[in-house]
Image (cartoon, grey):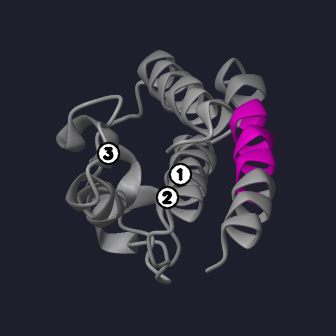
Amino acid sequence: MPEREGAELAARLAGKAREDATAVREFAANEQIADSIIGFHGQQAVEKWLKAVMAVRGVRQTRIHDIDRLAGMLEDDGAELPLDRDRLDELTVYAVPLRYDELLDAEPLDREATMTLVDEVGKWADAQLDQGHV
């Protein structure tokens, strides 16, 4: 992918990630919104930020929603991740397609920890994109 196309894709993905992150922050305080909804938007934000960094780095995109695999692809390209891969991967259970059997067995979502995780990944991704040499 040409550098300009990668930068444009990265900007679009990062913008969409910010929208999901906003949903996480807004929904987290509302007890009536299910953990699965908050987890879904958290997973989407992290996935999109990882893919934004991949786009700028020129890492080939795949249609996967597994955060651990995406993180591994970035590490293979020499990227330093903002958090341990296991920590990043905590939200993969909420990915599309939803893994209903895993969701049914999932522990209650730690909403505060989810907001922190999403915010940390967002800060890392934005810094990577701002540096222009991700």
Residue drawn at (19%, 42%) of the image? 86
Badge 2 vs badge 1, beta-carbon distance below 8 Å: yes
Q: Which residue is mark 2?
A: 57
Q: Is residue 131 found left or right of 81 in the rendered image?
A: right
Within 10 Å of the Cα at label 3, are there few (<14), some (14-19), or many (20+) other Cα atoms? some
Q: Could you tell me how far apart the alpha carbons at marks 2 and 3 are, in whole angstroms? A: 9 Å
Q: Is residue 26 found left or right of 72 in the rendered image?
A: right
Q: Is residue 68 found left or right of 16 in the rendered image?
A: left
Q: Could you tell me how far apart the alpha carbons at marks 2 and 1 are, in whole angstroms? A: 6 Å
120 shown above or below 80: above
Q: Position of residue 104 (x, y in %)?
A: 34, 60
Q: Is residue 11 magenta?
A: no
Q: Sequence order check: which comes first, mark 1 or mark 3?
A: 1
Badge 1 vs badge 3, beta-carbon distance below 8 Å: yes
Residue drawn at (50%, 83%) of the image? 63
Magenta-colored span:
13-23
Q: Which residue is mark 1?
A: 53
Q: Position of residue 73 (x, y in %)?
A: 29, 64
